[in-house]
Amino acid sequence: MSFRLANSASRRRFFRRALAIVAGLPLAGLLVSLLRREQSRRPPGAVSIPADAAMGLSIIDGAIVYRGGDGAPRAFSGRCTHLGCRIERVVGDEVVCPCHGSRYRADGSVAAGPATRSLAPMRIEPDPASGGWIARASS
Amino acid sequence: MSRWGTLGDLATAAFVIAAVSGVAVAVPYDPADGYGSIAAMLLANPAAVFYRNLHYLAAQACLLLTLAHVWDRLRAPVERRVPRGIWLRLALTLPLLAFIMLSGFLLRGDADARQALRIVTEATTQVPLLGPLLATLLFGAAERLELIYVQHAATATIVVWLFVIEHARRVWPRTAALVAVTLCTGVLSLFLSPGLHDGRDPVLKGPWYFLGLQEILHWTAWPLAVVLGGVVAVGALYAVREIRPARAAGTKVALLAVAVIYAGLCAVGAFARGENWAFSPGWPAGAGNPRAGFVFAATPEVPVPLPVAMGRPEGCLACHRGVTGLGNSHRPEAIGCMSCHGGDGLTLDKARAHAGMDVIPGNMATAQGRCGQSSCHASVVARVERSVMATMSGIVRVDRKVFGEEAPGDARAPVHVRQLGRSAADTHLRQLCALCHLGAAKETLGPNDEGTRGGGCNACHLVYGPAALEALRRYQRQKEGGTPDAPTVHPALSLDIGNGQCFGCHSRSGRIATSYEGWHEMNEPPAQAADPARPLSAGYRVVEGDRVFERVTPDIHHQRGLDCIDCHTSAEVMGDGVAHATKSGQLRVACADCHAPAGASLPTLPSSALDPESRRILAIRAWPGPAASRHGRTAKGDALVNVVIDPEGRPAMVRKRTGERLALKPTARVCVEGRGHARLSCGSCHSAWAPRCSTCHTSFDAAGTAWDWIDGAEVRGEWVEKSGPFVADLPTLGVARRQSPGGAGRDMVETFVPGMILTVDRPAQPGRPAGTVFRRLYAPIEPHTTRREARSCESCHNDPVAIGYGRGDLRYGPTPSGGRWRFTPSSPRLPADGLPADAWIAFLGARDGMVSTRDDARPFAVEEQRRILRVGACLTCHDGRSPVMRDSVRNFQAVLARRTSKCLSPAWD
């Protein structure tokens, strides 16, 4: 009797779990689909660099912009490659991530860790409307 | 179990209080504008602030009590009495609780929280396989707070509450525990508020319980290892129920050790981390930290709508309304007060609002966080910090060189005055020199005057107009009488920089500020100078420190109305971003940039090619009249915005402060004729005079006391300087190497004064006995006493001071072997080197070694002296303006070839 009871309880547990899996899998699949759709809604980054942007290193709308002696800008994503913080500070010839202290040079390379990867370069296009440039995240 | 129940009961009570108070906070909170809605609560809704405080403090209490409860139960140990499933869920409660705490922090929406959101999203994304999806599920995809709000207030809270109910087997906490925790957190909530970081403070910190994590992440390039560590810790907590008791005990000790180390890291992050991860011990005082103050303190009436500056609510403007005087760029309605002055703009309680306020912002120590904010003048402040006016590099290097303390290899390395040590030279600098640099702090309200030195950005840009000065005086009078009203007229932060701004520092040493205006300092002023009852005539001027000046010839540019800034560009004054070893490296303008050589044109550039800073300056200046299509360009390539070229090609200088246009004339033809004077700088002929102080003595009084300008403290041991007589005289000439852009440089004849003919009684130092140092160094100087008329030929070729021999009788006469020059000095010879006291070199003698304050400058060599005196011999008979002497400038050899028998050439042997 006790064996049958245990067996019966085990069978019930088995069917309950099987039902949960059968019902849960499609729901989990739908959830994954929902999340992926949300992720794809992230807009591509584009930053307008005005014609009178400061020479040297500056931060414009979250992008790291460097204008050398020839005035032509180079732009890098202001997103720290260590953990994604937004770099908001120029200190001397470098930009510094405020979260964990990574430092990057004007060419985007790492001057001091913890980051190990250079900043992502952005594509620069002239902006005839403003006389400046548009920096776009490289795909 | 005490009368309050277990620690778990207290933790549950704190959880319930946090949840219930969260309902009240939810009413004014707006997840679409987390920061703005909390700022509005802080400014205008004390009851909401109380509930927010209660919510925050109960949550912190819940975390601490839960951890204490866990350790209490592990210590018992009772884990094996808990069913496996419940134990698993209890272990998972800890990361869930951490998520609730963290998400609550993220909902602040302030600068700290925005960065924290990026970090946790990225760290979660890096988890293999499910990471990206999990990050989107928990934190959303677009750095918005709505989803986090739901996960915080609903999902995680409900799940944890269910786990707690299952574990405690009761829905509500014990009454005693609830009362105890409510009382404690409630009372604290009246006085302690969590911070809100508007982003001005460059130090970003996570919540206190994650500061250890932030420290670890600072050191590791693999954030995933930290995530893995967290998983292992939770796994270990679960495992203590499953493994053998002996191993479980060891695991518990290990968990405790990790917790203690982690708490230590949190303390390091909280109390010892400063800007850019510098070690900076102290009580955390940033805007993101909790702040104390009675929540229901009486405050002024809340304005509707709330004042907003820089896109954020700012309470300062509720009281400081209608402040004028700052000009368009800095008007309070645009940038608020906090941007510059700090303080707490998220309260209307005056005491709290003004706590930590920077009354005089712009000093170098704080300039980067004030004027140099990323949205303001970040690149300019970085330049200024490296400029010689901030570093004093040249002065420091020369002083060390004079004291014999310059290390080999230091010759071209820039140094900074704030790095001064304790050597003899450095203490000398600390006491006598280190007050004239931009890093010296301005500490009193009011305009810059004759005694003002330093002040960072204020040194040049703080300008008090009459209205601002009157407002300040009224405020100071009211303050003496009791409660003052805040001034409603603010001094301007302006480009309207008069010569007075330069005076405090530049009326000393080379004294170019006073020389430019035609004032010469007297070391023996008239007797009545110290008697206020007998005012001096207009020919004298007494400046701060009872220094008396006499009227002499001013600079022609001053007479024409030009200010210092009309010639000196921003790149020259504020630096070009490079730390130069000496001032000469930072100079960027020259006479020829405005006065084209006769027959030539000024180098120019089209206005379309102006750099952005120049364009911005032009726009702010807004001079009357048509805009120029071309501007001047220096030899170093800088734009001269106020040198404009009219359509006919005529250059003019625009006075920067007034817009008045003055025609720019080319040099005289004689300046470019022949080779005779090709090496002469403009100043060597056109400088009318220079202040000369030929000898001084510097001694060290070990028993005296003096003020250390770097430490801002009185110190034992005093450097005493006794100067010799001052005279206003034509400058000496010498040779300095002038660097040309892209070239190797060339030797030019420049103007010099006795920079350091001095003896120094140097005290004993470790490894170096006391001794007397003697130096005879001349210093190159641009005296700023330019005149249209040049000095006479005789004043150079027949003058012993000009050639470097010092004052005396320089006479040319016949001898049986030819003409002979002879020199009889009028100054006594110094025993240290046998030269006359004011001389640079011996008559027709040579010197090498340390001869000038600058390494690339020297007196005339013997052959150069002979060439000068050879012409001087001619001038003993021929007038300098005579045709033959004018011809000699063009071609001296041709003139020599046609000399007659009456001409007596000098013999040198």
Image (cartoon, grey):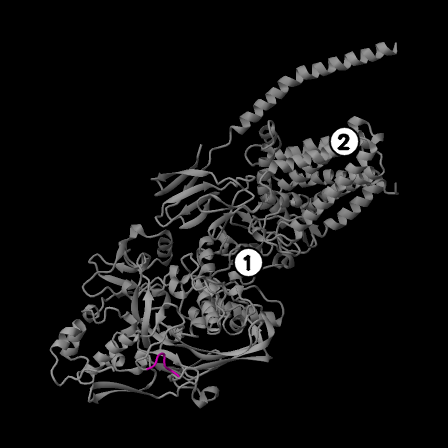
Write down the region rendered in magenta: B837-842
Q: What chain does mark 1 sit on?
A: B
B718 above or below A120? below
Res B9 seen here: no
Q: Is residue B442 magenta?
A: no
Q: Amino acid at mark 2?
A: Ala
Q: Residue at x 26, y 54 (%)?
A: B629
Residue identifier under label 2: B239
B570 relative to B18 in the view: left or right? left
Q: What chain does mark 2 sit on?
A: B
Give the crowd class for mark 2: few <14, some 14-19, many >=20 residues within 10 Å: some
A31 relative to B791 in the view: left or right? right
Q: Secondary structure at mark 1?
A: helix
Give the crowd class for mark 1: few <14, some 14-19, many >=20 residues within 10 Å: some
Residue B636: quarter of image: bottom left
Residue B877: quarter of image: bottom left
Front-lying residue, B387 or B28 = B387
Front-lying residue, B10 or B796 = B796
| Cα distance between the residues tagged 2 and 1 | 54 Å
Any mark on residue B276, and which? none
Res A70 seen here: yes
Q: Residue at x 51, y 29 (%)?
A: A41
Quadrant that contains the N terminus of chain B? top right
Q: Residue at x 59, y 56 (%)?
A: B343
Q: How many marks?
A: 2
Q: Residue B256: x, y in percent? A: 76, 42
Q: Does mark 1 fall on the same chain as mark 2?
A: yes
Q: Secondary structure at mark 2?
A: helix
Q: Residue B150: x, y in percent? A: 64, 33
Q: Main secondary structure of the magenta part?
A: loop
Any mark on residue B341, and which? 1
